[in-house]
Image (cartoon, grey):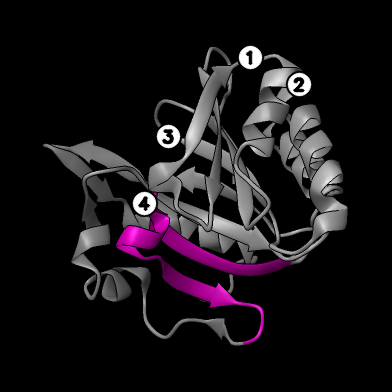
């Protein structure tokens, strides 16, 4: 998904959110001290906490992972994983994803389009799931039912999510600035899906 993309010179940001509410996330400019990163995770509380590292600019790229609520035995491990990811090579999002996840994820669980940092409030459009396969219809036709994603006030990304080793994801922006918002580029989405599924019907 990152073919042809360069992290060189990109400003970075790390953020933590509770219950998937990225609109209310707290964050830090990168690079950040390991102690500050650990505090960011710890101060988010004991519940459903997720962390993302973002490479800013166009296209936006982000990787993230979630610590499930009630997984008290995972609290310290997750905190350390986030600290390691924050210190990893800034030119390699795949390495940061593996650090956050606690290992290299392999089989995708689902693929969806969503509004960056407004994933829940706008609502994602699921394009593929491991259980069901591809959604019925082309990306363009599916987006006709979701005008708030077709043209959004914030960048729209294609996100590939994994269930193991812990819930994690990689997102790449698939929109372009247009007036006072962002318009989804259907060919970009189709090309990324084609690469993911080796030419299967997206």
Residue where numbered disc 3 is placed: 59
Question: Would residue 22 be found to the left or right of residue 55 on screen?
Answer: left
- Residue of label 1: 31
CA gap between label 4 and label 1 equals 24 Å
The magenta-colored residue range is 108-131
**Dot 4 crowding, Cα within 10 Å, few <14, some 14–19, many 20+:** some
- How far apart in space, not on screen, are marks 3 and 1 (Cα)? 20 Å
Mark 2 residue crowding within 10 angstroms, few (<14) / some (14–19) / many (20+): some
Sequence-first tag of 1 and 2: 1
**CA gap, disc 2 to disc 3?**
22 Å
Q: Residue at point 50% right, 17% down? A: 11
Sequence order check, earlier mark of 2 and 4: 2
Residue 87's disc number: 2
Q: Which residue is mark 4?
A: 118
Mark 3, residues whose alpha carbon is within 10 Å: few (<14), some, or many (≥20)? some
Q: Earlier in the sequence, mark 4 or mark 1?
A: 1
């Amino acid at each position: 998904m990152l073919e042809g993309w360069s992290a060189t010179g990109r400003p970075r940001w790390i953020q933590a959110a509770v219950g998937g509410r990225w609109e209310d996330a707290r964050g830090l400019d990168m690079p950040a001290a390991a102690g500050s990163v650990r505090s960011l995770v710890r101060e988010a509380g004991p519940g459903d906490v997720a962390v993302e590292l973002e490479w800013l600019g166009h296209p936006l790229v982000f990787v993230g992972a979630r610590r499930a609520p009630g997984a008290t035995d995972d609290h310290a491990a997750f905190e350390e994983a986030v600290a390691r990811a924050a210190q990893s090579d800034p030119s390699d999002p795949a390495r940061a994803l593996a650090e956050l996840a606690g290992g290299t994820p392999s089989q995708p669980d689902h693929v969806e389009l969503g509004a960056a940092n407004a994933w829940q409030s706008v609502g994602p459009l699921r394009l593929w799931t491991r259980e069901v396969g591809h959604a019925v219809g082309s990306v363009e036709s599916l987006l006709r039912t979701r005008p708030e994603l077709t043209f959004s006030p914030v960048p729209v990304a294609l996100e590939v999510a994994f269930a193991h080793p812990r819930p994690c994801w990689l997102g790449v922006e698939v929109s372009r600035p247009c007036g006072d918002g962002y318009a989804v580029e259907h060919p970009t989405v189709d090309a990324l899906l084609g690469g993911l599924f080796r030419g299967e019907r997206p």
